[in-house]
Image: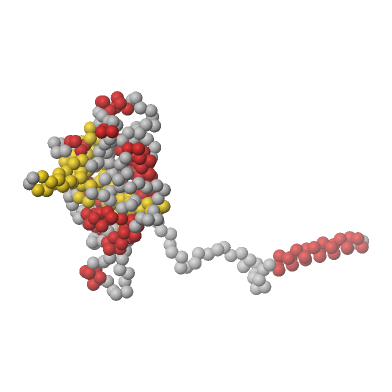
């Protein structure tokens, strides 16, 4: 026979169970069944599919095939205080004898409050991407007129244009930038800018052309001629034109501008053995007592008509197989064998087994 105390315990347990069930059920909609109590999140039907990128690097890095993959060219130009040079820069770029639909352009603008570089760059890019009259006739009137990615379809439009911009941390005027005392800091900044630009803008191209905004004179066929060398890194000489006056009137003369293309010598290597590990060398300052005892490629013009192996390069006009950058060879902001930026890049590339060649007889002209 069940005692009164046992009945009270059972009653209390029943009340507790009912209370718990009521608490649970109170949080559910009245029409929700047991099977409907949980529904996993679903992807909306209008969501775009995942964008999958697949690259065959062997094709991209094989420039001898007939495939377009190894022929795509990326032209990269860092910019600072360059508004006045951009119009001439784009005029020269458009003379390059290479299919535009295989060319992509990339820019990194270091922006200052008083600098009009980004605005002028945007204006030039808009002009480039504006369709020709022939293209407009082919398009319906309601079709978008511009594009920044033309793909590999043959056209007179550049394949892709990338513009990066960041707040400038430091800057020097055109007159100041070649002072010896400023070189280490300036070249470190340039190295970081180049690295940021190439790792962001490089996609599926087989070649990278580093082109300074100040370089406005070069043969339209120069890119093709450097590609034909089939070397990992190729550099022409960079000179400047000057007009001098004589008794017979004006006379145009040329002289070396970029001294960063050079060859080590027995004397230069012996000189470096006496340096501290962190000491950095810069070219073109012999008159100030800073000789490095190297052979400047500029001094080989016009006698040397072939190619020469270089140990240092400049970045005014520098053609690089993209695989060099993809292998991790960039522009050091700390010294590699006493060199920074482009010269350090050449040292690094050679350590990785890549060929670095110069063509003394090929000239580009600085502003």
The N terminus lies in which quarter of the figure? bottom right
Q: Which residue lies furthest to the bottom in this view?
A: 141
Looking at the picture, does residue 297 appear above or below residue 228?
Answer: above
Q: How many labels does the image show?
A: 0
Q: Residue furthest left?
A: 248
Tell me, yes or no, if residue 95 can be seen here. yes
Where is residue 40 shown, x and y percent of the image? 57, 63
Q: Where is residue 21 in the image (x, y as percent from the top left)?
A: 74, 65
Residue sitting at x 38%, y 41%: 185
- Residue 327 sits in quarter: top left
Q: Nearer the viewer, residue 269 or 180?
A: 180
359 relative to 270 in the view: left or right: left
Q: Does the image show residue 53?
A: no
* Residue at the image point whose x is 65% and y is 69% from the top: 33
Farthest residue to the front: give it: 247
Residue 22 lies in what quarter of the image? Answer: bottom right
Q: Which colour scheme is used?
A: secondary structure
Residue 44's x, y, as percent?
Answer: 49, 67
Residue at the spot 26% in from the left edge and 36% down from the top edge: 284
* Of residues 105 and 323, the one drawn nearer to the viewer in this rendering: 105
Residue 172 horizontal/vertical position (percent): 35, 46
Residue at coordinates 28% horizontally, 48% vertically from top-left? Answer: 212
């Amino acid at each position: 026979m069940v005692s009164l105390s046992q009945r009270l315990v059972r009653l209390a347990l029943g009340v507790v169970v009912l209370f718990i069930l009521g608490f649970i059920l109170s949080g559910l909609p009245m029409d929700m069944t047991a099977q409907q109590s949980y529904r996993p999140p679903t992807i909306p039907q209008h969501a775009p599919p995942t964008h999958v990128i697949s690259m065959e690097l062997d094709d991209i890095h094989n420039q001898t095939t007939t495939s377009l993959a190894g022929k795509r060219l990326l032209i990269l130009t860092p910019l600072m205080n360059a508004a006045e040079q951009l119009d001439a820069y784009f005029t020269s770029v458009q003379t390059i004898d290479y299919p535009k639909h295989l060319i992509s352009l990339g820019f990194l603008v270091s922006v200052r409050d008083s600098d009009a570089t980004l605005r002028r760059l945007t204006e030039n890019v808009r002009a480039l991407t504006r369709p020709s009259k022939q293209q407009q006739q082919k398009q319906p009137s309601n079709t978008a007129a511009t594009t920044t990615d033309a793909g590999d379809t043959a056209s007179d439009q550049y394949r892709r244009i990338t513009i990066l911009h960041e707040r400038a941390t430091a800057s020097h005027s055109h007159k100041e930038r070649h002072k010896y005392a400023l070189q280490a800091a300036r070249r470190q900044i340039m190295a970081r800018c180049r690295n940021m630009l190439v790792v962001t803008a490089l996609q599926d191209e087989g070649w990278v052309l580093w082109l300074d905004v100040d370089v406005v004179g070069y043969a339209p066929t120069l890119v093709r001629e450097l590609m034909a060398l089939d070397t990992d890194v190729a550099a022409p000489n960079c000179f400047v034109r000057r007009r001098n006056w004589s008794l017979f009137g004006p006379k145009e003369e040329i002289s070396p501008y970029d001294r960063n293309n050079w060859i080590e010598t027995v004397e230069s290597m012996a000189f470096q053995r006496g340096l501290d590990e962190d000491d950095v060398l810069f070219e073109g300052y012999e008159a100030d007592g800073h000789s490095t005892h190297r052979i400047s490629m500029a001094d080989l013009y016009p006698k040397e008509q072939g190619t020469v192996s270089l140990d240092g390069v400049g970045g005014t006009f520098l053609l690089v197989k993209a695989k060099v950058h993809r292998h991790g060879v960039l522009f050091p902001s700390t010294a590699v064998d006493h060199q920074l930026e482009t010269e350090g890049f050449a040292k690094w590339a050679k350590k990785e087994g890549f060929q670095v060649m110069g063509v003394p007889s090929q000239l580009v002209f600085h502003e």
